[in-house]
Amino acid sequence: MDGLARTLSILGHPVLVLPVAVWFAAAPGYARGGRMLAGFAVFGLLVMGWSWWQVRRGRWLHVDASAHAERRALNRFLLFALAFGTLLAWRFAAAPVALAIALSGLLVFAAVLSARWCKLSLHVAFATYAAVLLWRLGLWAVGLGLAFATALAWSRLVLERHAQRDLFAGAVAGGAAGLLFWRLLGWQGH
């Protein structure tokens, strides 16, 4: 069980889930293929590199940033990186890509605001957000995305990274961000 939970947790990491969701949400016609993928690869490397550096310096116990102070530092870094990514996307990509990245920052901001009451699961928030971003592909894609988000929530419980309220808060935040994305775009594509 632990092995499956760990695998799901890695596959559902926001650094992996976000690019896939934005790719599908921005297509067809909006995506700038190679540039967009390169941008997300750089973003992922920055986040993972920064997390690894924190562990190496002895500031964090693990790159997962599970402790409260670790999570606070990670969220601040993510807010900065996503704001910068939004500006770059606004300049070099299309508006839907910039909007998707900006709303990702809003998810991290929700985690910051709710930190006193819960440890909002960004894994589940981003997986749910990604599921709703798949709207353009059809309800079947949204359903598959939500099934994955549910499996990811299970993995976070098994690995004892979150309590149920953290997962629920993540799912609500992610769903709201996804609905806001389509609302701001006028529900294009369906």
Image: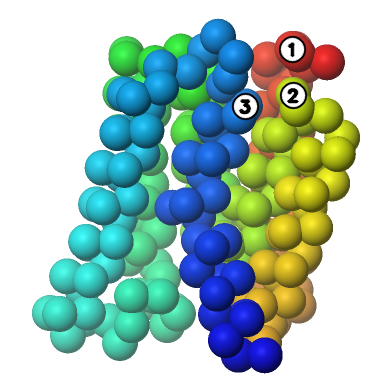
Of marks 2 and 1, which one's residue comes earlier in the chain? 2
Pointer 2 with pointer 3, Cβ within 8 A: yes
In the rendered view, tell whether residue 176 sits above or below residue 117: above
Residue 78 placement (x, y as % from top left): 37, 51
Of marks 2 and 3, which one's residue comes earlier in the chain? 3
Residue 162 placement (x, y as % from top left): 63, 80
Distance in Å between CA atoms under marks 3 and 1:
10 Å
Mark 2 vs mark 1: give the one in front. 2
Residue flagged by tag 2: what amino acid is it?
Arg
Pointer 2 with pointer 1, Cβ within 8 A: yes
Residue at (22% x, 62% y) in the render: 50
25 sits left or right of 34 in the view: right
Distance in Å between CA atoms under marks 2 and 3:
7 Å
At numbered mark 3, what does the secondary structure look like: helix, strand or loop? helix
At numbered mark 2, what does the secondary structure look like: helix, strand or loop? helix
Neighbour tally class for label 1: few under 14, some 14-19, many 20 plus, Cα within 10 Å: few
Distance in Å between CA atoms under marks 2 and 1:
8 Å
At numbered mark 1, what does the secondary structure look like: helix, strand or loop? loop
Q: Quadrant of residue 171?
A: bottom right
Neighbour tally class for label 2: few under 14, some 14-19, many 20 plus, Cα within 10 Å: some
Residue 163 placement (x, y as % from top left): 69, 81
In the rendered view, tell whether residue 32 sits above or below residue 22: above
Residue flagged by tag 1: what amino acid is it?
Gln
Q: Where does label 3 land, which residue?
A: 25
The disc placed on residue 136 is 2
Quadrant including the N terminus: bottom right
